Every structure is written in structure tokens, then in C-alpha cells.
Amino acid sequence: MIARRILLSAILMTVSILVEATSSRARLPPKANAVLLAPCSNLACSFLPLIKTEPKVVAGDGVIDIVSRANERALFAELHNSSTVAATDMIVTANIYTVDLAGNADLIATVRNTPVFTYALPGQIIPFQIGLGVLPPHGVYGTYTSTVSVQARLITETSRIVPAVVYTPIDPFGDLTGGVVVEVRNDSVTPIRNVQFAVWSLSSGCGARLRTFDTELQPGGVLTEVASICTSFTTVPIETIRIAAQAEK
């Protein structure tokens, strides 16, 4: 009888230890980078690591600058299409913050807009800008900060192509220039039309203007155009100049 009681006590102790261990495991917080697949029970929780993939169209660094004497401001930035197909229906969302002396950021505006190009072709960088209007007084540092995200639809078929394009700075002042001579060349064996290009520099705070030409460009043909970086004469560092071009085949 005594032996039976000892055995039963040992069995109950073992069960109690197992239940406590199982309950402790169920109370463990979710692991980092994991998603809960099943609710916690008295048995266990099941976790599956997330498979993280880089977004195909991302927003690069932006610059917020004054665009008029009325202290209106705009966000100038770029979109990078890292996919192997074109992106369209792009909507850019920017959250604008001010920063106080302690480095605390306060959200003051959320704004949306679309890029100047309808498409972002594979591997292409295109500009966008969002008018912010007259913002509240900024932080102690005198600048704003922002976080930018983009939604886009990827498409496998498009008649748009990236033509060959080069530019030459106009009368550079050392490492600075106020404009460029743009040459868009048709290196394909068929004509291209609806040529578009934009020239910009994030250091200028002037954004980018899209230029469209309806003329058909024959194989080997060259389209030459003078483009200023800003509407008014403003010099920018030559190495900050970017240009994007598209055409329809």
C-alpha cells in the first residue's frame, strides 16, 4: 500500500511538472520576425518565420525645401524600380514631421501624389514631388523630416522603353551648372515616338518637369533639347543631376 502511494505520488508529480512546463512554453512571447499561426492552448504555440522580400518599387531619400516666398514647401524625392517588369498606378504617401531640440518627431501632415512619369520601367529611377503648402512652424533645427512609402502595380507588358540618353552641362561654373543639353537617341531598328524625359537634382529643391515630344524619332535619330534644372536660374552640383527618359516603340 505504501509503495502504491509513493508510485501514485510520483506519477502526479511528473504530470504536474509536464503541465507546468507546457503552460510555461505556451506563455512564451512570439519570437522576433515570426507570425502566430495558431492560438495558444494548453499544449503549445506554433510559429513560422516570415519570409521577407524587398519591395519592388521603393522611395529613396527626399528633400523638403521652400518653393515660394510664401514659405510653401514641397517634398522632392525619387522612386527606384528594382523589378524586372514595369510599374504603374504609383501612389506616393509621405508623412511629414517636425523635430524638437530633444530629437522628438511630431507628425504634422500626411500627403499623397503620383510621380511625373506614368510608368517606372525596370531598373529605372524616376522623380516625384509633393506640394506640402504652408506648414506649421518647424522644429528648432529649422528642418523637417519625412518617411515615404509607395504603392504600385507591376505589369509584364508595356510599349514603353528606355531610349539612350546623354546630357552635357551648360557653361558649368566649376562643378556647378544651371542647365543641361539633353540628347535622346534611338538606337533601335524601329521608330520610337512619344519621347519623354525629365531632368532634376535633389540638391536644387526645384523638382522635375516632364517634357514630352510627339514627333517620331527614326532609327539612328537624335532629339536634342536644352533643359534648365529649375524654372529660375539656380546652379546645382553637376554630380547631383539625374535624368530619366522613356519612349513608345
Image: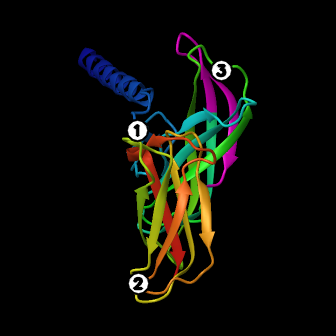
Residue type at mark 3?
Answer: His
Position of residue 201 measured from the top left corner of the image (x, y, whole percent): 49, 46
**Residue pointed to by mark 3:** 138
10 Å neighbourhood of mark 1: few (<14), some, or many (≥20)? few
In the rendered structure, the answer to whether residue 161 lies left or right of residue 196 reads left
Most foreground residue, 43 or 179: 179
Q: Earlier in the sequence, mark 1 or mark 3?
A: 1
- In the structure shown, which secondary structural element does the residue marked by tag 1 occupy? loop
- Whether residue 180 is visible, yes or no, is yes
Q: Which residue is drawn at the image coordinates 28% and 18% (left, top)?
A: 1
Q: Residue 33: which numbered mark, if any? A: 1
- Which percent across, then down, holds residue 135? 72, 28
The three-letter amino acid code for the residue at tag 2 is: Gly
Residue 34 in magenta stretch: no
Tell me which segment is drawn in magenta: 96-115
Residue 66 lies in quadrant: top right
Number of numbered callouts drawn = 3
The amino acid type found where label 1 is placed reads Asn
**Relative to 29, 120 lies left or right:** right
- Say above or below: 249 vs 127: below
Along the viewing direction, whichever of 158 and 174 lies nearer the viewer = 174
Q: Which residue is mark 2?
A: 220
- Of badges 1 and 2, the one in the foreground is 2
The secondary element bearing badge 3 is classed as loop
**Sooner in the amino-acid sequence: mark 1 or mark 2:** 1
Q: Residues within 10 Å of mark 2 (few under 14, many from 20)?
A: few
Q: Is residue 55 visible?
A: no
Nearest the camera: 52 or 208?
208
When the figure is inspected, residue 83 is found, relative to residue 19, above or below; the finding is below
In space, the residues marked 1 and 3 are separated at their CA atoms by 36 Å
**Extreme residue in the bottom direction:** 190
